[in-house]
Amino acid sequence: MKTPGITISPIDTIDGVHTVNEVRFENVRVPAANRIGEEGSQAIRRFIGIDPTVDVAPDATTLLKFRRLLETHKLTRVVFDTINAHLAKKGLLLKEARTVGATIIAAPSSTKNQSGERDADMHQTKKGKTWHFGMKVHIGVDADSGLVHTVVATAANTADVTQAHALLHGEETHAFGDVGYTGVDKHDKHRGRTVKWHVAMKPSRRRLLPDTPLGKLLGKLLGKMEQAKVEHPFHVVKNLFKHRKTRYRGLAKNTTQLMTLFGLANLKLAKKRLMALPAQGAS
């Protein structure tokens, strides 16, 4: 970690404890002697099982047809559910508590395209003082492990609270959300449910707390709740996987891709725990 270009910055959690770091890599050069495996596309071809001397690499049309099959038959959702079933079998997905949240994925707002129109499935919304155009991804996260259980995609102007019911599986005893879920327990779609909601306090109410160290601590706790858990999958998808903008037109195509991304994000987040299981006698 002393290689030039690597910067490590400590990140203090909400309780003031330093347990994680932010690691940045800027123009880091790794000596060839430290390389693991083969170099370049040869290693990729070997991994996916394509021998260029025998097999013909699929062309763009074949890949397009394959993507349409994934979309038509909702196969990426099957992949997502299969990953989660494996994680649940390993004891990494529980059902008692759920944290919900949403993020905006930007879409091109330009009309300089073949149709001369914006994507009809995308809409604009105002967050703070900034306008955004695109879609919104709503996720339900296991409050203990931080793994994504449910993914729902809508236009960006869809209120978070209207999708809360779709992010629960029905067996939760507690659910956590930010201020966007204020009043969720009074929503029509939640009538009859026994889940207890814990929604972050609005800034206007937090400002009424006493200006003391205890009051400030309570303000942070009541403002954040369990939201750190829901931010981790978003960080993986948007920052590690670089999926900050839509790749296709329409919600259906983008949702198909998001199911795969969040399935892979779960594997990324659970990697250390999965690798530690054999040492604990798990199969």
Image (cartoon, rainbow, N blue to C red):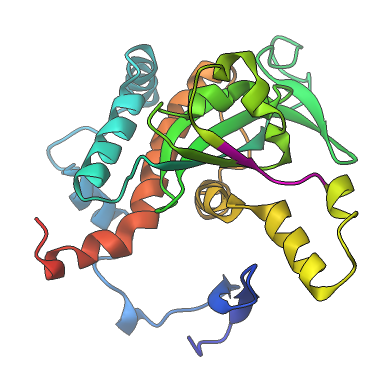
Judged left or right of residue 120, residue 85 is: left
Q: 8 or 43: which is nearer to us?
A: 8
Which part of the image, by quadrant, shows the C terminus?
bottom left
Q: Which residues are magenta?
A: 197-202
Q: 73 or 43: which is nearer to us?
A: 73
Judged left or right of residue 193, residue 226 is: right
Q: Residue at x 75, y 12 (%)?
A: 117
Residue 34 in the image: above or below residue 147: below
Q: Position of residue 211 (x, y in %)?
A: 90, 68
Q: Position of residue 105 (x, y in %)?
A: 64, 35
Viewer can see residue 182: yes
Residue 78 placement: quadrant: top left
Q: Position of residue 136 (x, y in %)?
A: 64, 29
Q: Residue at x 24, y 37 (%)?
A: 85
Viewer can see residue 254: no
Q: 124 or 42: which is nearer to us?
A: 124
Residue 153 in the image: above or below residue 173: above
Q: Residue at x 41, y 26 (%)?
A: 170
Q: Position of residue 195 (x, y in %)?
A: 49, 32
